[in-house]
Image: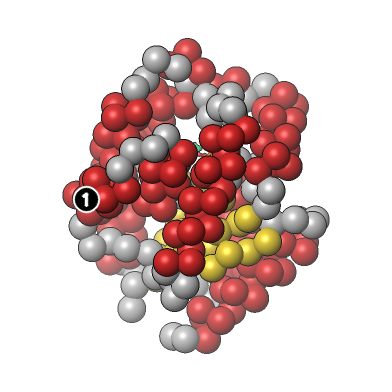
Amino acid sequence: MAHFITLEGIEGSGKTTQIALAADFLRRLGYSVVTTREPGGCPIADSIREILLHPDNSALVPRAELLLYAAARAQHVDQVILPALQSGHLVLCDRYTDATLAYQGYGRGLDLELIEQLNALACGDCQPDLTLVLDLPHDIGLARARQRNDMYDQGDEGRFEQEALDFHRRVRYGYLELALKEPQRMRIIPAVGNVQEVAERVSRCLEGFHGRD
Ligand code: TMP
């Protein structure tokens, strides 16, 4: 059985830290885990990521942004995700199709049905079995993300952090609405508290998934 798990959340929700801890936890359960991320995950998609996230590219129009995310995803699915699943690995992916619905749909206001069609074109039936949404108030998440960028001087990762607070509020509520529509696949994990507390919530959820095998 394929095991494809995605992690989602607004800026500063702690996905990067939690994905590493989740991978360790799943390995201890006996899975062979491949971690990857979107946009990116392979050289061509990484090049598209640079275009998408560079602060100098603020002129990128929403439709072009949407198409670039879809292009990066198509490449990533064919080159990384599908081969890993077919070889029996568990794939843990930092963001996937729900991010496009939340950011380009709820955030930018592009048509959700159109995005679903593009998602389908990019990934066919390569759908996650489980999606964890790390949720926290958007103002707290954004403050965390800005602090991290200042600390590590990650200027090239900053285009979305520059968006207004209201954009991040729409993205957050987008994720919550998506999770309400698909409660079987999507689980909301409160991301408030320290790293260990959040990791325990994530592990409990993964344990339940493991128990279904
Ligand atoms: P990251 O900061 O989690 O690596 O994600 C990169 C940024 O790309 C983040 O601000 C969310 C955004 N994004 C979209 O807008 N649409 C998408 O489909 C994906 C995968 C990411």
Residue 11 in sight: yes
Q: Nearer the viewer, residue 107 or 77?
A: 107
- How many discs mark residues in the rendered view? 1
**Residue located 23% across and 63% down the image:** 125
Q: Nearer the viewer, residue 12 or 173?
A: 173
| Residue type, mark 1 in image | Gln
**Residue located 51% across and 79% down the image:** 209
Can you tell which quarter of the image residue 196 is in?
Answer: bottom right
Can you tell which quarter of the image residue 168 is in?
Answer: top right
- Name the element at disc 1: helix
Q: Nearer the viewer, residue 138 or 166?
A: 166
The image shows residue 17 at horizontal and vertical percentages of 66, 50
User: Vertical placement of 165 versus 112: above or below?
Assistant: above
- Side of 17 where 30 appears, left or right: left
The residue beneath circle 1 is 117
Neighbor class of circle 1 (other Cα within 10 Å; few <14, some 14-19, many 20+) is few
Q: Which quarter shows the N terminus?
A: bottom left
The image shows residue 76 at horizontal and vertical percentages of 31, 45
- Side of 48 where 163 appears, left or right: right
Mark 1 beta carbon near ligand 1 (under 8 Å): no
**Residue located 74% across and 30% down the image:** 147
Can you tell which quarter of the image residue 2 is in?
Answer: bottom left
**Residue located 73% across and 35% down the image:** 143
Residue 68 in sight: no
The image shows residue 154 at horizontal and vertical percentages of 62, 25
The image shows residue 183 at horizontal and vertical percentages of 47, 72
User: Vertical placement of 91 versus 109: above or below?
Assistant: below
Q: Which quarter shows the C terminus?
A: bottom left
